[in-house]
Amino acid sequence: MLGAGPTGALAALALAQAGWRVQLCDPLSAAALAERSRAYALTHSSRELLEQLDLWRPLAPHLAPFRSLELCDRATGDQVSFRGADLPPDAAAAGDPAVGWILQHAPLMQVLLAAVAQRPAIEACLGREPQREAGMDLVVAADGHRSPSRRAAGIHQWSRPYRQGCLTVQVGLRGSAPDQAWELFRPEGPFAVLPLGGEAFQLVWSAPIERLRRLEQLEPVAFLEALSAALPERLQPEVLLDQPRAFPVALEVAWPLRRGRLVVVGEAAHRSHPVGGQGLNLCWRDVQELGRLAALVSAGRLGVRRLPGRYARRRWLDILLVLLATDALVRIFSNRAPLLLPLRRLALAALARWRWLRRLSLGAMTLGPCRLPLG
């Protein structure tokens, strides 16, 4: 296992649970792996995987649930609310009315690495290069979107940069319930407001990267003024809780998803726009499929040499649908195109009126497009 971030560490745990012996390698130490100011939106597909790996309960104290998601088109003024009642049956059966959960990076990595340390089947080689690869049945590359393992294997990556970038920052904010999340569609790009508990929120601000670089350099008071102008009037930022960080965004996908005994998972395989909070959940569905196939190998129902090809075939549809859907959302809603505005109004009006359509949309977001609730 190459890469011990959120996806790599989770994949190591999934393989160990399937009965495999795993060497988990990363050039960063455990302390460095946890040092990141970032928060993730978890959906019900990720909850299912964490429950399967007995990780949901240890993570529960660190989760900030959101029980409503407000979808707002700032160009037209239309708004739709998604709530627990709109969850599809597979998600609602869990008994938790949360639409999703926000989890910060540091506690996530602490729980994952603690679980890794408790698994005798996992040999953790953190802070140094891999000790060996010869003789291994499978090599899993989870070493990020710049993946040296993918490049060394000669796997091609298609990349299309967005004109937008993203800026992430945590702030104290008034005007929103502590269990309420917001996805604001603005002409310059989507803007997510994600609850961290109390009055703390993680913001993911999409805009032209040059503008974000300038915002990143502002003094706190000036930054808060610019932020207040970008948010709806009811949402009032009061204090910065960390340093704003801007980064470019691209649509990326590797082809193929395997080469020989190497498979690529997570951001080594794909990267989408942050709109809708789909990134980590898509990565963890890679892990879920890898774990299923590894269990079949352990049970003698699948040859180990067939696992990479089976994994690649099974993951393509989910990956492509999520990449296409997030790209379409950005392109349709990040503008004031006169021809698109009536269509956007119609789409949000239909969502607001028909619960079955909200359930269909929320099902695609929270369980993945390959598990659409059509019944």
Image (cartoon, rainbow, N blue to C red):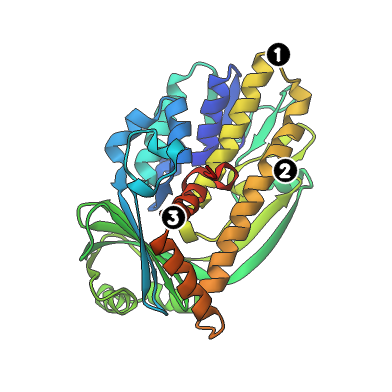
> First in sequence: mark 2 or mark 1?
2
Q: CA distance from mark 3 to mark 2?
A: 32 Å
> First in sequence: mark 1 or mark 3?
1
Q: How crowded is the residue under tag 2: few (<14 C-alpha within 10 Å), some, or many (20+)?
A: many
Under circle 1, the secondary element is: loop
| Residue 82 vertical placement versus 148 (above, below) | below
Q: Amino acid at mark 3?
A: Arg
**Going by the image, does 129 lie left or right of 233?**
right
Residue named by callout 2: 257
Q: Residue furthest bottom?
A: 338
Q: Nearer the viewer, mark 2 or mark 1?
A: 1
| Residue 171 vertical placement versus 331 (above, below) | above
**Going by the image, does 148 lie left or right of 340?**
right
The residue closer to the viewer here, 199 or 352, is: 352
Residue named by callout 3: 358
Residue depicted at 36% across the width and 77% down the height: 77
Under circle 3, the secondary element is: helix
Q: How crowded is the residue under tag 3: few (<14 C-alpha within 10 Å), some, or many (20+)?
A: many
Q: Amino acid at mark 2?
A: Leu
